[in-house]
Amino acid sequence: MTNPQLNLKADSRQQIGKAVKTLRTQGKIPAVLYGHEIKPINLILNYSEFEKIFRQAGESTLVDLLIDQKNPVKVLIQDFQTDPVSSRFIHVDFHQVRMDEKLHAKISLKFIGESPAVKENGGILVTNFNFLEVECLPNDLVHEIEVDLSVLKNFSDSVSVSKIKVPAGIQILTKPEEVAVLVQEPRSEAELAELEAKPEAKLPEAVVEKAEGEAPVEGEKPEKAEKESKE
């Protein structure tokens, strides 16, 4: 799977602390570029341009970041903050990568196809997680990894990490015995009646963990607390 070529413009900024609030009212997002052995750089992004790139890149696709119309640098969207009310982006962290150094990342799983056990027999599809932790060179990083659900033909069938195929150059760090997705037998009428009589009991439901705010790269992620006051 070939990743798209993604380009994003950014301008360096002097505004720090409370002054960045004004930028947000102007359709801008304050950001910071970090990297191995480089000094952090404060940036300004166009909101709509970043939003478009984020939909395509997520946190596991390389982006060419063009700062002040200079030569672009390869980055990953390492972290971001959103407003708890509006869900709008309010801050972004980028990590500049070295193309000759392996990095740690989280690659999203894309579930494709249909499970016969679910479609034909009414089974319950349960997803335990929706990404894999990996290590690879930046050029080997892919946006997503596909998991075929058509192999889930019977109740209790499952797809463990060891059964997931990844492109060459990617080393999976998630434990191979971990189960990504499985099919459970549907509840009987008696079991459903019993559950309804006990409100505290819940039906099994898919668990989807979104790694919001987690850095998909090597090393420690920067502390977000008091970030704005230190920029």
Image (cartoon, rainbow, N blue to C red):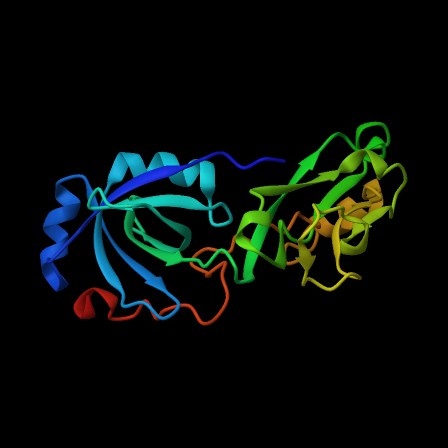
Q: Position of residue 127 (x, y in %)?
A: 69, 48
Nearer to us in this view, 126 or 107 = 107
Q: Position of residue 33 (x, y in %)?
A: 30, 58
Q: Position of residue 206 (x, y in %)?
A: 66, 47
Would residue 140 be found to the left or right of residue 220 on screen? Answer: right
Residue at 46%, 41% (x, y): give it.
57
**Residue sitting farthest toward the top:** 120
Would residue 48 be found to the left or right of residue 127 on screen? Answer: left
Which quadrant holds residue 135?
A: bottom right
Would residue 37 be found to the left or right of residue 134 on screen? Answer: left
Any part of residue 87 in sight:
no
Which quadrant holds residue 148?
A: top right
Any part of residue 60 in sight:
yes
Nearer to us in this view, 117 or 89 = 89
Q: Position of residue 52 (x, y in %)?
A: 36, 34
Residue at 52%, 62% (x, y): give it.
101
Which quarter of the rendered picture does the C terminus lie within?
Answer: bottom left
Residue at 80%, 55% (x, y): give it.
162
